Image (cartoon, rainbow, N blue to C red):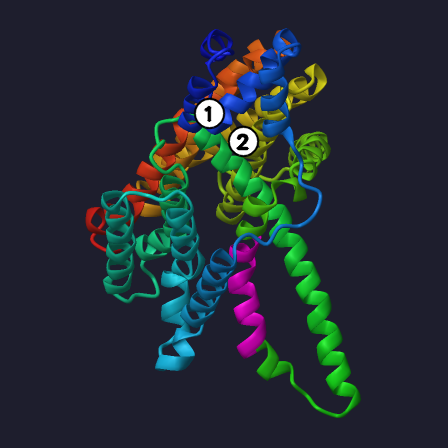
Amino acid sequence: MKEQILGNMDSPQQLERLYRANKVLFKKEFNLIYSKVESSAVAQVWYQRLNYEQREISWGSKYELLFVIALSLIAGLVAKLPNFMGMDADFFYPRNISFIVFPMLAAYFAKKESLSVKRMLIILGTIAASIAYINVLPVSEKSDTLILACIHMPLFMWSVLGFTFTGEQFCNTEKRIDFLRYNGDLVVITTVILIAGGILSAVTIGLFELINLRIEELYFQYIAIFGLAAAPIVGTYLVRTNPQLVKNVSPVIAKVFTPLVLVMLVVYLVAMVYTGKDPYNDREFLLIFNILLIGVMAIVLFSVAETSRGNGSRVGILLLLILSVVTITVNGIALSAIVFRITEWGITPNRLAVLGSNALILANLIMVAYQLFKSVRNAKMLLLVENSIALYLPIYSVWALLVIFLFPFLFGFM
């Protein structure tokens, strides 16, 4: 892309074509070479166009805002289906919680990316088939495969959202990394929205109590649940319409949390040895250990995505490398523990699911750590780290697909 941009500085039409073909990559490469061509009037115009930061909040077009409001209301109505249709909440929510928000976000990006009819039909068919499948699985309180399917369904729906987000550029690694950045930005803005909503709810309930009206139950049943369902949808609208809102916040959070998580993880490992906790024979401890591993893995991936946004400092990359190595150590312990349990007590759906997840995460972490090691000496090599992450994301989707749709039949719905 660099060579194409440099070779077409005198051809505005070709530059526009390159930009429209891959806007994210074009901006990144153009900013890297701008110092070489900044004397050109064309380059100056493009620089301002690509890096202009809107200071005021934009609410987009009236029709887009109405579309977001409609999606938020639909999400709230889906969340209230058990009440409206007399369904068992214990049956509905574990199976269908993924379908409250993810389909609405997919609809938003399908419209935003102007997807082809064929692609939209694939997405719609996948979501519809998933809803039908998860709700016809046999009812059983002790079915491990049902629980695993319910746990992995949000990951699969997240994958469908990623497929929608990337639009017609699914194979573009930069677009996949942009999807990870969007997730980081969404977590930040949704957290702010929920905190603000929580304060508003407390004030509202408190004011009504002053006039002797108890509205807590009514408020949480019909207002709070709609707000919870709408928060990620509204948050998505805000970060995509106003990228300047959290563009500078997410990298700061990544820089702050990387050393904190590293210290926490090291202290935790030392404390584990000191207290004599044994993940090999303590099932609950192994479960918590794996949850910790998944959380740290997510932080590593999002931190790499945010660090690469600004090319990253050598210290920041080194911290990420150390965190990756420590996480590999944690993963190794968890993996050896689950192998031990399978050797001693045989294969069960839960053990096989944990084994597969740990093996996938370990392979991904090794790839990331290797590329980070090379990036310590050359920050521009972060692109290789991005590629290793982006290329691996579909593998998690395939694994979620197997656990959801194959495990119940493989283990006889046990």
Image depth: mark 1 or mark 2 in front: 1
Q: Which residues are magenta?
A: 221-235
User: Is residue 7 depicted above or below 309 in this figure?
Assistant: above
**Structural crowding at the residue carrying mark 2, measured as other residues with C-alpha within 10 Å and reported as few (<14), some (14–19) or many (≥20):** many
**Structural crowding at the residue carrying mark 1, measured as other residues with C-alpha within 10 Å and reported as few (<14), some (14–19) or many (≥20):** some
**In the rendered structure, which amino acid carries the disc numbered 2?**
Leu
Is 20 placed left or right of 311 in the picture? left
- Residue at the extreme right: 210
Residue 405 among those drawn in magenta: no
In the rendered image, which residue does mark 2 sit on?
Answer: 301
Q: Does the residue at mark 1 contact the one at mark 2 (Cβ under 8 Å)?
A: no
| N-terminal label among 1 and 2 | 1
Residue sitting at x 79%, y 87%: 210
**In the rendered structure, which amino acid carries the disc numbered 1?**
Tyr
Q: Secondary structure at mark 2?
A: helix
Residue 228: where, in percent of width, then height?
A: 55, 64
* Helix, strand or loop for the magenta stretch, by majority: helix
Residue 396: where, in percent of width, then height?
A: 38, 36
- In front: 172, or 143? 172
Residue 364: where, in percent of width, then height?
A: 45, 25
Quarter of the image with the C terminus is: bottom left
User: Is residue 49 depicted above or below 60 in this figure?
Assistant: above
Residue 262: where, in percent of width, then height?
A: 68, 30
Residue sitting at x 53%, y 42%: 183
Is 351 placed left or right of 335 in the picture? left
Residue sitting at x 41%, y 73%: 89
Q: How many marks?
A: 2
- In front: 111, or 334? 111
In the rendered image, which residue does mark 1 sit on?
Answer: 19
Is 361 placed left or right of 95 in the picture? right
Is 188 placed left or right of 289 in the picture? right
